[in-house]
Image (cartoon, helix red, strand yellow):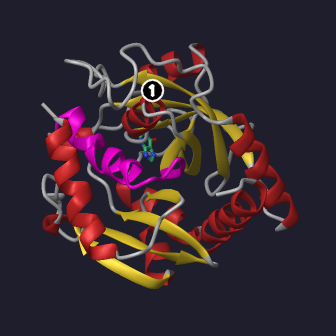
Amino acid sequence: MTSMTQIDRAVKSIKERIGDRTPAIGLILGSGLGYVADTLTDAVVIPYGEIPGFPVSRVEGHKGNLVVGRLDGVCVAAMQGRVHYYEGWTMEEVVLPARVITRLGVRTWIITNAAGALDASRYAPGDLCLITDHINMMGANPLTGVNIDELGPRFPDMTAAYSRKLRSIAKKAACSAGLPLKEGVYAAMMGPSYETPAEIHMLRTIGADLVGMSTVPEVIALNHMGCEVLGISCATNLAAGVSAGKLSHEEVKETADRVKDTFEKLVRATVREIHSEINL
Ligand code: HPA
């Protein structure tokens, strides 16, 4: 069980390292986007293993750093790498880093991920999509157990889990940067196996447009804490049964890699626009 003491201990250890930097925006950098954190200026890089209680990915080659620095002049806290529920972490462990960073004073979050697209007539691999809402199919929720009232309410509202205001800011940023941006509802599955065609059929029927294995736990925990959240998916592939071929992690990585410059431009433009529109 996560406790306030555990969270406070991690917050204290980060504060000791970041000096007077006060991050205003939190970034969770999904598959293929982690390098954005390498471009921060005046940055402090803290490996997750050096922060008390932070989960460290068991998957080899996965970077796990908290990078606090400036992105085009805006102080951000970037999670370079995240852990997933399918790795065997508890939901509480999955959301702990986001909770700790929020306690540093971050109220605004940008969360990115790779996702499968459910409708070939509306999406193509490589499309960047704003998440408008989600469907939690993971069979678990990070808020089960005793509620920590200091963090948020027992029954948090999820009506605007993906902030309308941030979505309109992101659209404006994308438009001025000339970057196409689609929208969709994201369904989160536990994974790690990809879905069957029958599962994809079910997800389409219940109103999903995109499918992935991350993001939803953090979005729930951050809404619990009263944060404004923006979610952006890179549609890396057509979901199982939507196209003739088989799914592979290689395809997901290849597409994420192909559009990473565009993805970075979108994240940067959005951070700048948030900074100029919201008095951070
Ligand atoms: N399904 C689940 N997760 C994913 C997919 C998918 O098709 N693509 C990228 N992450």
Is residue 209 located in the magenta-colored stretch of the structure?
no
Which residue is located at x 58 percent, y 21 percent? 204
Picture layout, residue 151 above or below residue 237: above
Q: Is mark 1 within 8 Å of ligand 1?
A: no
Q: Quadrant of residue 150?
A: top left
In the image, the segment drawn in magenta is 89-113
Residue nearest the viewer, comparing 155 with 149: 149
Is residue 97 located in the magenta-colored stretch of the structure?
yes
Which residue is located at x 76 percent, y 63 percent? 276
Q: Position of residue 274 (x, y in %)?
A: 70, 57
- Quadrant the N terminus occupies: top left
Picture layout, residue 227 above or below residue 269: above
Q: Position of residue 188 (x, y in %)?
A: 42, 31
Ligand 1 is found in the corner quadrant, namely: top left
Please, what is the three-letter code of the amino acid marked with disc 1?
Answer: Pro
Tell me if residue 63 can be seen: no
In the rendered structure, the answer to whether residue 220 lies left or right of residue 185 reads left
Q: Which secondary structure, mark 1?
A: helix
Which residue is label 1 attached to?
197
Q: Position of residue 104 (x, y in %)?
A: 38, 55
